[in-house]
RNA sequence: GGCGGGGUAGCCAAGUGGUAAGGCACGGCUCUGCAAAAGCUGCAUCGUCGGUUCGAUUCCGACCCUCGCCUCCA
């Protein structure tokens, strides 16, 4: 089966065929975070989505080179370090570490490469020099360098590949009209920004004097440096389509480094934004969740991941606390089933079998269809129900359990939820559970219920199962 | 104003020209000393109004509502 993905370049679902279709190597770049603060849940929708793409490509037999940039020089960063007096590297290092921790919490595989903008200044400068030589970049009187869209178009290149924007029909804001010194054209953008006093010690030497890179250029420089001038997949949040990605295309294709007939990027994917509690996220509304906020509230990374993966990536999705609670319950059903299957498999060594679980086939069918996760989950829960029914009828043999478990593990490599970790139970809780069991055996239910209440006040509950009473954290 | 997404049960969310997946919540039942957990099970005619069609939630038109981009926000 072929994987089909929506391509923003042509606004349609297309079969995904990498440049290196023969050996199934895939170059994939995802715009990463600007490290000036903790990432919020909206940021991580995109990164979890990128992780799904990467995992699913691997599931399909591709060898993926996953690159994600870390933007560690930028206006907001400069403002923050000026306020706090922290050195740039220390400040951005702190939030980079936090970002990577959050990725781990959400069970995202670390990108194979995590280039930082400040480590690629020479490549950035080279690229700007090249654009300048080709007449597509121009200097302004303050020592900045801009990308000239008009000149770019004269070269036969197309500006406006990802979005159709009619410059004359655009809203003229004060920002555009009053800003940016002597740009030739309102939509030209900075490649290199001349040093200003507010930049403090954040600057690099360049052929145009001291300054720092513009925002878009780092992604062009780093992606081409690590994946070549033409690569397969580029992803990011929908807001980045314009101007960021459009400008990346312009800078990269303006460099003329691509082989004749090859684009900078073959396939563009954009993840839609999230609403949180039905509203756009904002600090004043109190719905601005970071991963660590949610963890503090007792939600696990896999619950958050599961919820983020419930809806199709091109759908604006409403992320709610109620949804997270639901995610917990739904995941528990899967966990319980997996526990049953594991138990059955372990009871008798399962003989090898030729039969194959239908689960991965159904899930792959759904994911092949532009990563239709909703359909994939429907298959998973159909499987949960059907397997439970089979288990209840007693027809299920250890080989059947082994088969279904193998099916789950196969598709799990793409979904990346992992298994629930059993937390150790404190001895004083275990003691009370034992005391309650003793009371129950003595038919002293009043005492048993009293102990249960006591446990509840300690944040624990107890569940009576066939294999004995099990303590559980509330 | 320009461009692009959406409006499907209490909530989240798939989908199709022939009478609508899945999850959560809720109800019933099973299990349980009682619970909990789990299991089984029940629960919608698809924003409004027109049109095309034997038949539309799915196609076309209009309208209403909502979200995003057009401003270095995923």
Image (cartoon, grey):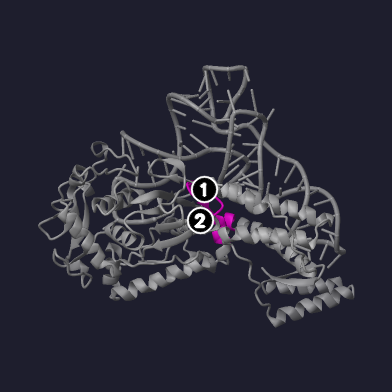
Q: Give the tally of numbered discs.
A: 2
Q: Is residue A428 visible?
A: yes
Residue drawn at (13%, 66%) of the image = A209
- Magenta span includes A319: yes
The residue wearing badge 2 is: A57
Q: Is residue A143 magenta?
A: no
User: What is the span of residues highlighted in magenta in the rendered image?
Assistant: A303-324
Up/down of A362 relative to B5, above or below: below
Residue at figure coordinates x 20%, y 67% from the top left: A198
Residue in the picture at 54% in, 60% down: A305
Q: Residue furthest front?
A: A22
Residue beneath the point at 26% across and 71% down: A82
Q: Chain of mark 2?
A: A
Horizontal and vertical percent for residue A34? 35, 63
In the image, residue B66 lies at what x, y percent?
A: 45, 41
Rendered image: mark on residue A3: 1
Q: Quadrant of residue A65?
A: bottom left
**Viewer-side residue, A351 vs A436:** A351
């Amino acid at each position: 089966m072929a994987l089909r993905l929506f391509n923003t370049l042509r606004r349609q679902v297309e079969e995904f065929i990498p440049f290196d279709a023969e050996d199934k190597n895939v170059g994939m770049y995802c715009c990463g975070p600007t490290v000036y603060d903790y990432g919020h849940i909206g940021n991580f929708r995109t990164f979890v989505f990128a992780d799904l793409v990467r995992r699913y490509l691997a599931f399909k037999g591709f060898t993926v080179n996953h690159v994600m940039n870390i933007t560690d020089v930028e206006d907001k960063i400069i403002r923050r370090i000026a306020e706090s007096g922290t050195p740039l590297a220390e400040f951005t290092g702190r939030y980079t570490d936090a970002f990577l921790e959050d990725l781990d919490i959400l069970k995202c595989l670390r990108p194979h490469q995590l280039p930082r903008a400040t480590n690629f200044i020479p490549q950035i400068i080279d690229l700007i020099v090249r654009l300048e030589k080709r007449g597509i970049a121009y200097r302004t009187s303050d020592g900045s360098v801009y990308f000239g869209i008009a000149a770019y178009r004269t070269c036969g290149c197309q500006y406006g590949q990802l979005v159709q924007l009619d410059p004359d029909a655009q809203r003229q804001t004060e920002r555009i009209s009053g800003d940016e010194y002597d740009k030739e054209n309102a939509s030209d953008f900075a490649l290199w920004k001349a040093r200003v006093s507010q930049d403090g010690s954040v600057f690099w030497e360049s052929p145009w004097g001291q300054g720092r890179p513009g925002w878009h250029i780092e992604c062009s420089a780093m992606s081409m440096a690590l994946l070549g001038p033409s690569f397969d997949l580029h992803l990011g949040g929908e807001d980045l389509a314009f101007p960021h990605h459009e400008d990346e295309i312009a800078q990269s294709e303006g460099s003329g480094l691509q082989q004749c007939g090859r684009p900078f990027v073959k396939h563009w994917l954009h993840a839609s934004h999230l609403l949180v509690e039905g509203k756009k996220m904002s600090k004043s509304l109190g719905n601005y969740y970071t991963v660590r906020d949610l963890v503090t509230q007792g939600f696990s990374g896999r619950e958050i991941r599961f919820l983020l993966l419930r809806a199709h990536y091109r759908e604006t999705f409403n992320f709610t606390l109620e949804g997270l609670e639901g995610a917990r319950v739904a995941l528990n059903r899967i966990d319980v089933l997996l526990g049953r299957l594991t138990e059955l498999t372990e009871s008798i060594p399962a003989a090898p079998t030729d039969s194959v679980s239908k689960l991965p086939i159904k899930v792959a069918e759904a994911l092949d269809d532009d990563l239709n996760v909703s359909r994939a989950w429907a298959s998973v829960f159909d499987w949960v129900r059907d397997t439970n029914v089979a288990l209840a009828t007693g027809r299920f043999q250890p080989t059947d359990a082994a088969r279904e478990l193998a099916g789950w593990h196969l598709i799990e490599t793409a979904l990346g939820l992992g298994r629930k970790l059993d937390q150790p139970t404190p001895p004083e809780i275990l003691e009370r559970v034992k005391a309650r069991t003793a009371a129950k055996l003595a038919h002293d239910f009043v005492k048993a219920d009293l102990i249960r209440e006591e446990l509840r006040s300690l944040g624990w509950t107890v569940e009576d199962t066939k294999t004995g009473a099990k303590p559980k954290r509330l």
